[in-house]
Image (spheres, rainbow, N blue to C red):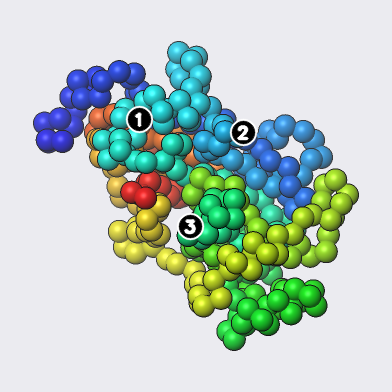
Amino acid sequence: MQDDDLDRPIHSIFHGFMFTTLLTFQPLYQTRVWGGRRLQTLLHRALPEQNTAYGESWEVSDRADVQSVCTLSDGQQLSLHDLWSQHREAVFGPALLEHAAPRYPLLMKILDACDDLSIQVHPPAHLAAELGGEPKTEMWLIVHAEPGAKIYAGLRSGVTKQAFEQAIADGTVADCVHVLEPRVGDCLFIPSGLIHAIGAGLVIYEIQQNSDTTYRVFDWNRLGLDGQPRTLHLEASLRSIDFEGKPPMFQKADAQGKLIHCEFFDIRRGLLDQSHLGIPGEHLAIALIRGQLTAAGKMLLAGDFAFVPACLSESQREITNLSPDAEWIEIRVGPA
């Protein structure tokens, strides 16, 4: 795209449907045995039911059974799958026109862990299809952490597959997993094959591959919402766990805001001195952590996720209002 294209009317660059502002989606709330009500108390959201524990809010989802929907200024509603399949160039730009994924390749959530999640693993790409699942690499950004909250990620040094199998039999799996103590602002990269669990007392933004495959190794001997023990997936877990990998470390953004980069997504922190959201022709998603941000006539508050359509011009991408305490991340789809 040439410099003189930056503010050309979008219909002369992108044919078909015209988008003129940021796209936001209706959150899709999921009940979980480990969930709570902090999406209401921290983010001031009106949850669907009183006294119900909601563990996840799916903010951006192109799953067949959990579909994000946006409402345009004229009242028309479009699903995320509509955008990906019918308006690929206008929303996602030339760089993603040939992306092989049949659905939008990322899933974005807010997690409210009021109890420990199960110790679990996601299958690596080379095994996922054979196991009947989908690979899932993800990243976590800690937006709330109560004193003493923990994250379990990676195996402790010296834990072999044989020792781990014995720990399953003994009910001591938690003793095999490396423990970290997160603080607000910490970020962790969780590739497929890494054993992990989110501990109680955390609210997390999760950016992941578009997958819903989780193999539970250990669930703290608790009952599910139906009053029955939750299913464990021991055989698939043992095949999926990377017994050679090292425990992860928290990652910090560099001076340019670069935080996480992998083949599936690129995550950057927004900078208070930046004036625009990306460049014309580029698609990105943004997730506001705190404060407020306004661009293309739409104001975002803490907890809001939004798409910046590729077809927006440079002037439409201008950040016209930014509170001094604003923090956000920018999410770009990788080439995989």
Q: Residues within 10 Å of mark 3 (few under 14, many from 20)?
A: some
Percent across and percent down for residue 121 are 61, 62
Left or right: 189 in relation to 156: left
Q: Are marks 2 and 1 in contact (CB under 8 Å)?
A: no
Which residue is at the front of the view, 250 or 85?
85
Marks 3 and 1, Cα distance to the nearest angstrom? 25 Å
What kind of element bears circle 2? loop
Residue 160 vertical position relative to residue 6 in the rendered view, above or below? below
Q: Residues within 10 Å of mark 1 (few under 14, many from 20)?
A: many
Q: Are marks 3 and 1 in contact (CB under 8 Å)?
A: no
Q: Are marks 3 and 2 in contact (CB under 8 Å)?
A: no
Marks 2 and 1, Cα distance to the nearest angstrom? 21 Å
Q: Is residue 332 visible?
A: yes
What residue is pinned by disc 2?
A: 65
Mark 3 or mark 1: whose residue is earlier in sequence: 1
Percent across and percent down for residue 58 are 59, 40
**Type of the residue with mark 2:** Asp
Percent across and percent down for residue 246 are 51, 77
Q: Which mark is residue 88?
A: 1
